[in-house]
Image (cartoon, rainbow, N blue to C red):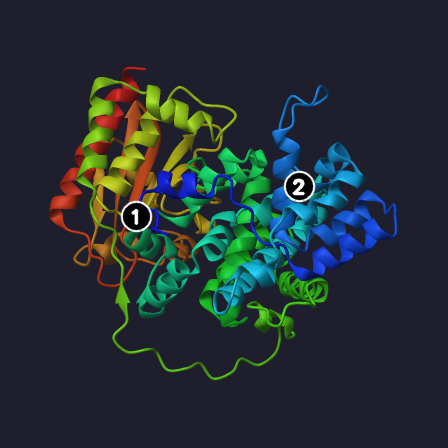
Amino acid sequence: MARPRRLQDWVDALSDYRLPMLPFSEQVLTRLAEENASPRVAELCAIVYRDPALVQHIVRTANSLQHKHLSTRVNSLEQAVMMLGLDRVLQLPQEMPRLEDSLAEPYRSGYLEALGGVYHAAVQAWNWARERHDMVPSEVFTATLLRQIGELALWAYDGDVMLELKEIQAHHDGYRDASEYVHLGFPISELSLALVQHWRLPTLVIENLRPERALGPRPYSILLALRLDSIAHKGWHTQEMEIVVKALARFLKKDIAEVPALIHQAALQAERETHFLSSHPYAPLLTEPDTEPEQAPPPKPNRAYFCPARQPELLSRALHELEKGDYSRIRKELAAKHEYLAEEDPVISLGLRALHSGLGLDRVVFAKYSHNRNALEPYMQRGAEDDPAFHRFRLTLGADTLAGALMSEAKALWVHDKNKDKYLSIIPRDVHKALGVDTFFTASIYVDGKPFGLFYADRHLPGCELDTKTFNEFRAICALVMRQLKRL
């Protein structure tokens, strides 16, 4: 079997593919069917939720049906079960491949590890939804489970590609997206998004996958949960965990001292509910949060970093569409992810894509100016999807702050080694720490003589340096965006 090459080739190969079901869920559902049992929907879903493949199949089946009472997608497992009916759901094991027949080692272990991680993230997000008094926490649980559907599909369909990717990531630091792009030609999140759209899975998953707008509360909670799970193997005492804990405290409006206990209890819950798994990648969170940290292992020598590469074709297309004012393609793409689009969204999005994909800048953010608050707040971004700080911040334009100085007129600035002492001293300490870099580009945007917003861009991985050529291009692209915004 030839391995698919392009993203669309993978989508075509997986379009009718069914993920393997766990022995646990097969045994329980088969027994219920044989006993002619009639469990309550909540009881049945509590079982099914432990198997993301089964959740995907049930929700996918429900959304494939034309139903006279539903004009929108089914967005939770509970809704899907009620729509299909108990008898139909209990028959589904007969339609799905069995894990032990489908995957040999080491692919089975990789699949189960990914499954255990996403279930842990879903339990965390569900608990936070309840803390926030979300009207339908089950929608958050379902969406979190299905957020990593691309990774599960790759393990099941072609486990070698995931083993090769893990080997690359073992020797290279940096964002996962970068190594995935080098190995596959696209990030796995793009595959997940394409499969979610093809299989008509919940809209909340789409909102969370590769978002450009700053996330609302529900998709933001999913981002936080997945970020937490991705760093859980490092334990409690890391800078990454500190950032997540602080972000979660602000999100839940809780004292920061309360948050580790919430995380710990949810991790214990996830472990109890997936007792049939032999290992749990989030195991360090099963220990008490105040446990003394173990001695950190020595740093691995000769670590390499993936620096984002320039993509001339994407740069050329984005600039061409900006210069011509042709926003039809980008407007259609944004409309598939976001319910509401402002007139300026396609212009800002094309600018972000030109900077991120075209110039190879890591994290690119557009913060919009709020006249009421006299502050900058996150609006759209590319490359910072997994950074909680880039979805929740407010920079007040004080006279003695860098934000205030920048927004006094339209201008671009490169903070670099020679001038950083001057500029970093007027950035709030918590903001500087969240950025994690001392060098970056920024440009203020004015429309009709009034402050409109600000672009920020960096290359935050060691060895991935900013340079004069890229700064001049950054400044030119920001100026082009500003001109096009004035024409709206």
Compared across the picture, whether 349 is left or right of 213 comes to: left
Closest to the observer: 423 or 167? 167
Quarter of the C terminus within the rendering: top left
Query: Can you give x and y, in whole percent of width and height, for residue 456 in the image?
Result: 31, 43
Q: At label 1, which amino acid type do we have?
A: Gly
Q: Nearer the viewer, mark 1 or mark 2?
A: 2
Could you tell me residue 161's position as x and y percent?
Answer: 38, 58
Report the residue at 23% width, 36% height from top: 314
Local packing at callout 2 (Cα closer than 10 Å; few below 14, some 14-19, many 20+) is: many
Residue position marked by numbered label 2 in the rendering: 58
Q: Which residue is mark 1?
A: 185
- Image position of 99 with respect to 289: above or below: above
The residue drawn where x is 88% and y is 52% is: 35
**Circles 1 and 2: CB distance less than 8 Å?**
no
Question: Secondary structure beneath disc 2?
Answer: helix
* Image-based side of 483 in relation to 89, left or right: left
Give me the residue at 50% from left, 23% from top. 340
